[in-house]
Image (tube, helix red, strand yellow):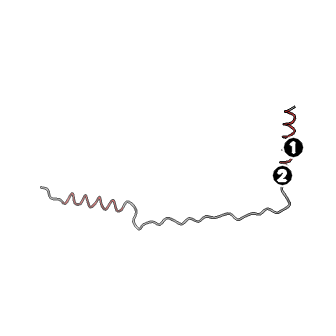
């Protein structure tokens, strides 16, 4: 008996849910797509490898120029 009541309740619920999901006569409101503009990252005037290369060149120059003899 409980199985019949459960099946009957499921049938009624699906019928009511199907009616609730039906659309109306109103026109669909379509919103324009949202465009997110992200600013470009600010870059420095020198690439990231220039300063370490200059430091290494200066250290090599100091090492070569030292007169240990």
Quadrant location of the N terminus? top right
Q: On the image, which quarter does residue 36 sit in?
A: bottom right
Q: Is residue 66 above or below residue 8?
A: below
With 57 as the anchor, is 31 left or right in this view?
right
Circle 1 is placed at which residue position? 12
Instruction: Name the residue rendered at 42%, 66% in the picture.
Output: 44
Q: Is residue 63 above or below residue 46?
A: above
Circle 2 is placed at which residue position? 20
Quadrant location of the C terminus? bottom left
Instruction: Name the residue rendered at 28%, 60% in the picture.
Output: 57
First in sequence: mark 1 or mark 2? 1
Question: Between residues 54 and 1, which one lies in front from this camera angle?
Answer: 1
As drawn, which residue projects farthest toward the top? 1
Horizontal and vertical percent position of residue 50: 36, 62
Q: On the image, which quarter does residue 64 sit in?
A: bottom left
With 31 as the anchor, is 48 left or right in this view?
left
With 35 as the anchor, is 41 left or right in this view?
left
């Amino acid at each position: 008996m409980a199985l019949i009541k459960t099946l009957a309740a499921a049938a009624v619920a699906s019928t009511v849910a199907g009616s609730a999901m039906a659309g109306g006569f109103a026109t669909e409101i379509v919103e324009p797509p949202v465009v997110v503009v992200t600013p470009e990252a600010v870059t420095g005037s020198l690439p990231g490898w220039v300063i370490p290369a200059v430091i290494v060149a200066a250290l090599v120059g100091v090492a070569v120029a030292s007169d240990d003899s």
